[in-house]
Structure formats: C-alpha cells, structure tokens
Image (cartoon, grey):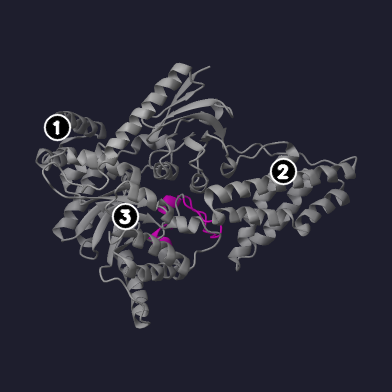
Amino acid sequence: MTKTLKGIAASDGIAVAPAYLLVEPDLSFAKKTVDSVEDEVARYKKAIADSTAEVEKIRDTAKKSLGEEEAQVFEAHLMILNDPEFTGAIENEIKSQKINAEAALDETAQKFISIFESMTDNPYMQERAADVRDVSKRIMAHLLGKELPNPASIDHEVVVVAHDLTPSDTAQLNKKYVKGFVTDIGGRTAHSAIMARSLELPAVVGTDSITKDVENGQMLIVDGLDGDVIIEPTETQIAEYKQKGEDFLKQKAEWRKLKDQPSVTADGKKFTIAANIGTPNDMPGVHENGAEAIGLYRTEFLYMDSSDFPTEDDQFEAYKKVIEGMNGKQVIIRTMDIGGDKHLDYWDLPEEMNPFLGVRAIRLSLKNEEIFRTQLRALLRASAYGKLGIMFPMIGTLDELRKAKAILNEEKDKLVKKGVKIGDDLQVGMMIEVPAAAVLADQFAKEVDFFSIGTNDLIQYTMAADRGNDNVSYLYQPYNPSVLRLIKHTIDGAHENGIWCGMCGEAAGDNIMFPILLSMGLDEYSMSATSILRIRSLMKKLNTEDLKELANKACYVSETAEENEKLVEDLMKKLIK
C-alpha cells in the first residue's frame, strides 16, 4: 500500500529504486551448554567460512568501486578470520566449556578487545580492537542467521535507508548503485546531508520513521527537491516523479552553461562563489561546477578516513594535490575540527556532557600541540604550490587566536631556517561561528586576513539549540533577525578593518539567505559544489541597488524568521519575472 512520508529535503534530485536497509539486526543470544561439541564446532567453522567468503566479496567490490586504499580495512578483517590464535581460542572455549558458539565467540572477542584497548601507547594496536569488534559481529550474525548490512557490498541500484548515516557510511556509498538515501533523523546541515550534496545524491532526512515503515526491496521514490518519500508508489507516481527528475536535470543543464562565467550581479558587481570540500576526491565536482575558489577544505576527513593520525607527509600530499588542482585560485584549508559529532576510533577523547560546547576544534588543537604542529607544518609546506589560506575553527577569544597564530609562526620560522619554501601570498583567517567572536568582529579583524562565517554552528550556538537534536530543530533558524544581526556585524567589522569576509556554512547556498547576504555585501559564498551554478544563476538576476534596504529590514524591522522568509520571497517575485 502506498504511503508518503514528509522529511527535510537535504540534497536536490529525484531517485526511484528499491530500499536497502542499512540497519543493524538484533544480535542478542543466550549462553547455554551443548549436547554435541562436534556439531557446535562444525556450526562455528561454517560461520567462519561464510564470514570469510562474505568479506572477500566485500573487499573485491570495494576495490573496484572505492579503490585499493578503502579496501584495506577488509584485508585486516580477513587476517583476523584466518588468525588461529583468535579462531582457535573460540573453538577451545566451545570444547572446554561445552558452550554454544555464540557465547564462546563473545567471551573470546571481549578478551581480545580488552587487550588491544589497553595498549594506550600504541594507537595502531588499539585500532585492532575495532577490527575484532567488526569481525566478531559478522561471525555472530552468521551464527544467528542474521544479515549484516554493508554499503560497500551494494551491487545493484538502491535507495539506502538508515536511522542516520555516519560520514564513513556515506563515504562508502557507490554512486553507480546508490541512487539516493533517506534517514529517520538529521537536518540539512548534518554531515550525511552535506556529503549527499557533494556526491550529488538525492536525499531526504528527518522522516522520523522510515526504517520502521519500509522493508528491504520495497520500491521508494525520494524527492530531494520537496522532501517527500513515497513507499510502494503507483505506476502513475513513478512516471510523474521520473518526469520531475528529468525536468530537474534539464534545469541543471541550463545552469551548467554558467560553469565558466564569472559570478556577477545584474549591475556588474563581482563576487566569489567557492566550493566546500571534504577530501581531494571532491575536486572533480569543484571543476565541473565552476567554483572560483575553495572556501572550506574540511581536513578532519583526512583523520576520520585513517586508522591512525595522518603523518605530516600524508597531509602535505593531500593539501598539495588540492592547491595545485585549483591552478592559482585560492584554497582555504581549515585546521582539524574534531570533536562534537566527529570522533576518531584511535583517539580516546574524554567523555563530555555536551561535546559541542566542549573540547573541540581549535580547543582540541591547542591542548594537543604536537598534532596541531604536524598539521601546520604540512599546510605551510603546501602553501608553496598555490594560493593558500589557513583557517582556525571555533575561535572564541583573542587569546585563542593569538596562541594559534604564535604556534603557526613558530613552525613557519623553523621551516624557513631549514630552507623550506613557504608561499608568498599565504593568508591566515578564522571562522566566525562562536557568537562571542561575532560580537567582537571589529577586534578580531585587526588580527587576521579574512573571516569565514560558519553558519551551521553560529546558528546552533546563538539559538542554544543542538542542530542534531530533532526535538529542537524548530530553533534552527538561519533567517532569525538575531542570527542575521551577528552576520551583518561580522561583515561590517571585516570591511571597516580592510579584510574580506566569506561564508562557508550551508546558508551561503540557500535561496532565501543569499539575497540577504548579497545585500550585506558578503564577499565570498562557499557552498556544496552542486549548489554553485544555481546560486550563480540567481546572482545574475539580481541588481544590488534593488537589495539596498533588504539587510536593514531583515535585521532590524522583521521580528521573526518567518517574516524574513516572506520578505525575501515577496521581493524575489517582484525582481525575478
């Protein structure tokens, strides 16, 4: 029976394909004694053989679709499955205690995990705990007759359905087969949504109940334009939405004609439209969409996609590749923003009551100077290969900024003394995402070469509403006059002190927010690469003279976010025929 769910349109486009549930099965079991040890050992050995065959298949698929490097984790899993110390210990438990294979597996795995996790002086060995956990889960699933989902093993067209998607889940999605995704939770600024836009996958998030309402293989329509998900659609609906998808692709083709054109308004004012990226693999999308710069390179994915801290040389090569790839256009690279909702398996950070307000981003870097210095050295070395801007995230005080700059200058001096070339036009900037920094923008502007406003965090901190918490999602209000006043104050503070101001939060590519930002005189608009041509098209239709009063009305006349949304919509109807 056809059912429609309403969610949040997180990434443009239409997908029509069967559902693939990326949901963990229940792997609970009861410990019990067995009558036949031989039969139990045979059952256990079959589970090992089935797990090995499955991992080999996943590895081979991952090699083809994701590359050798991404497939390495599965090689590690195969080593564990073939390790007689591990598999033999489980078999011995079954024989000596005469217990079922599930209990023997669980007890043995927990011992190995504890041993690896206790090796605090060896991050590589600590990482093996996660591998043992993954392998054990796979063997357990085979023993219990359950199927584990794995995005890397998908080999036919599907719509991925999940409660939520982690950045590593999303990174494994193969665009050849994954046509879109739907989640129970999340918003437009969730990392899964941002990744979906980078991958150009239609996505709807925050449906509340998709994982309960749909079964594996059921046909789905994902409308990433309006936020609708249709389960078991009729033939008529499938035809309608396929047409809607084709119409959207035609619109994209029109926008594509603007790829090599400058970003100018109808009255000839020039601005910069840049791209946000997570890895060097995002560069094709940057070029295909005609980005004039990279306004945000999120370096934390380098750390998240690694089994240990990336070395200075690893980082240098990644940064150099992106800088050279931009052929002289500016690249803004943010120092690592770990913490909050971004964790590393190999970095045991303390548990915090509220990690978004805890030790994250620059706070974490300043507390772990050697890790910070390694990254800064790699960035400084890479600056010789193009136009680089180094950006510090989550600065809240002048003292934090000055400490970060001092460490950067110390590493710069050391490299220069060694004869290492540093770029001549290196710029140093900071993100404005803490309201305290926005309020003191005029003071911070005297210390840096540029600002970049991170609206995703600025909004959640201004409204005191966790952007990942669906219960307070109504408070995530980009158009709220309080948020807009902070943004205007930041831009004014930058311009009064002779520096440029950009925005790298998702609001930069928002159709309602964009005219307001243009009215404020924002210099650079950095967004998911797939939003660039749409915004460039909109910019070409707007005359800055017609927008002169918009910023003041939005900041100081309107009282609510809804009033501002209507204010812009009404103005756009008048200006764009």
Magenta span: helix, strand or loop, mainly?
loop
| Marks 2 and 3 close (CB-CB < 8 Å) | no
Direction from residue 558 to residue 200 in the image, left or right: right
| In the image, residue 351 lies in the stretch drawn in magenta | yes
Q: Which residue is at 62% across, 49% downward?
A: 60
Q: Position of residue 523 (x, y in %)?
A: 20, 52
In the image, which is nearer the foreground, mark 2 or mark 1?
A: 1
Q: Which residue is at 60% across, 59% downward?
A: 127
Q: Nearer the viewer, residue 3 or 249?
A: 249
On residue 294, the disc is: 3
| Element class at badge 1 | helix
Q: How many callouts does the rendering have?
A: 3
Vertical arrangement, residue 536 with respect to residue 411, above or below: above
In magenta, the rendered stretch is 342-364
The local crowd at label 3, few if under 14, some if 14 to 19, many if 20 or more residues have their Cα within 10 Å, is: many
Q: Which residue is label 2 attached to?
A: 140
Q: Which residue is label 1 attached to?
A: 575
| In the image, residue 112 lies in the stretch drawn in magenta | no
The three-letter amino acid code for the residue at tag 3 is Ile
Q: Can residue 226 be seen in the rendering of this structure?
A: no
Q: Position of residue 317 (x, y in %)?
A: 43, 65
Between the C-alphas of marks 2 and 3, the distance is: 45 Å
The three-letter amino acid code for the residue at tag 1 is Leu
Between the C-alphas of marks 2 and 1, the distance is: 62 Å
| Element class at badge 3 | strand
